[in-house]
Amino acid sequence: MSRATPELLEREATRLLNSIEGAELTRKQRLEIPQQTIPAQDPVERRSNMSEVTLGYTEAQARLEAARCLQCKNAVCVEGCPVGVDIPSFIQAIEDGRYAEAIAIIHRTNILPAICGRVCPQENQCQATCTVGKVHKDPLKAVSIGRLERFVADYERSTQGSGVPEVKPETGKRVAVIGSGPASITVAADLRREGHAVTILEAFHRPGGVMVYGIPEFRLPKAIVEDEIHTLERMGVEIRTNFLVGRTRRLHDLFDKDGYDAVFIGSGAGLPKFLGIEGENLVGVFSANEFLTRSNLMKAYDREHAETPIFQPRKVAVFGGGNVAMDAARTAVRLEAEEVNVIYRRTRTEMPARAEEVDNAEEEGVRFHFLRSPKRILGNEDERVVGVECLAYELGEPDDSGRRRPVPIPGSETVIEVDTALVSIGNDSHPLITQTTPELETNKWGNILTDENGKTSMDRVYAGGDIVLGAATVILAMGEGRKAAASIHELLTSDSDDSA
């Protein structure tokens, strides 16, 4: 798949923008504007670096893409946004060149636009309902809302830096937030804005949650996450790292010994699942979580400077078809693996990974083996991986997820020669907090149960994000955090009223 160069994309966008500048565009004219392709690094060049793959819209491209928006009165796109961003208004501001106003509109409900604009699956959320996509009878031709969000967020960072939200007078109330992923960041920001004292308790040595340890640099530069964390600190949020709730402190201690008035649990779902097949204990088998954490959080890919080792892959098999599987496969490419294979038991159509990420992986040379699933991992006399035996599948009737169920074909075994296997079939919630706090009710998967406002079975304890939803998106986690923050604020305000 060939890509136009960034220079060519910019020239064409500038030409088209000049041709419509100042005109009152009709609905038909807006629908005739071509969707703007986001500039990206050359696939061959990016295989050997960790720099961000997509370069972001230029100003001409952003204004042209914004001009595709029909400004629908019913704003169905907003209904698809978990945090309710006023999408038509910020897009209109971009079309008019009012970028500061555009980012201000987004910031009313989304404090992480530079992150959401990069990693959230807008094609399944706000863009899925876009009228432009429906008119073209192709959802992929919807207005590129996420890329426009990224454009104005990056514009703000490059021209004026991230601003500090206004904080109301101190209330004297204290809230502990467990974890520092997107749900926790949202809760911390919303409650701090209201004047409550907020402390984030992070188990790792660096804050940021899955955005730091899970998502690679080439998809989400860590400098952007660090900027958001620094914004929290400038607001007055305290961040304590290497603090493992359940070990450093039990949940009850946060109330009884530390005097917090409320607690939010946003500890994520970081316990990897395995297949339970023969050979998973061989040398060379890793969870994608461990592989990515070593590379992303500890920068083990920088072999000259990092103190954390990482296995040197030669021929790799990745089991799974989600975004984490794509991240693992593309990281292996950048670690100079000779061959990277993704093994997935359904077809490309059923893959949960974003289509853009699958396209990028293909451009970078990743091989896909559809309708295949590992039956066993093969090892040598030294107990090291030498191959994976796969069974072929065909698609049957749809299962509970709505996807056609993969049905094994007896006698169809084949072997792929590999020395590394990365298991990426999902995660469970880490049980430490729930094991040390039996009052917290969970479901059969270990996810914490909450009501519609994020309230758990324990008094003054709330939860949100992956620890509640299972594996979810950044923006969905933020939506959960926003609901919980509103509920916590109401609780703390009620406390103040009662003591008045």
Image (cartoon, rainbow, N blue to C red):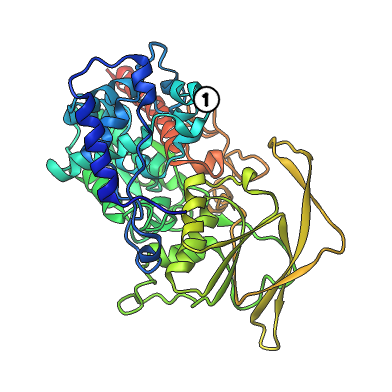
Counting the numbered discs, the total is 1
Residue 13, by quadrant, is: top left
Residue 283, by quadrant, is: bottom right
Residue 403 drawn at (x, y percent): 70, 39
Q: Amino acid at mark 1?
A: Glu
Quarter of the figure that contains the C terminus: top left
Please tell me whether residue 442 is drawn above or below residue 53 in the rendered image. Answer: above
Residue farthest to the left, as pictured: 160
Q: Of residues 299 and 190, which is closer to you in this image?
A: 299
Element class at badge 1: loop
Q: Is residue 128 left or right of residue 157?
A: right
Please tell me whether residue 259 is drawn above or below residue 166 in the rendered image. Answer: below
Identify the residue at horizontal 52%, vertical 62% (top origin). 329
Residue 63 drawn at (x, y percent): 25, 31
Q: Is residue 314 left or right of residue 100?
A: right
Identify the residue at horizontal 41%, vertical 22% (top origin). 78
Q: Of residues 168 and 101, which is closer to you in this image?
A: 101
Residue 264 drawn at (x, y percent): 42, 38
Question: Is residue 322 something one can see in this rendering?
Answer: yes
Residue bearing mark 1: 452
Question: Is residue 490 something one can see in this rendering?
Answer: no
Please tell me whether residue 136 is drawn above or below residue 380 in the rendered image. Answer: above
Residue farthest to the right, as pictured: 410
Residue farthest to the bottom, as pictured: 381
Residue 192 drawn at (x, y percent): 26, 34
Near mark 1 (Cα within 10 A), the count class, few <14, some 14-19 or many ≥20, is: few
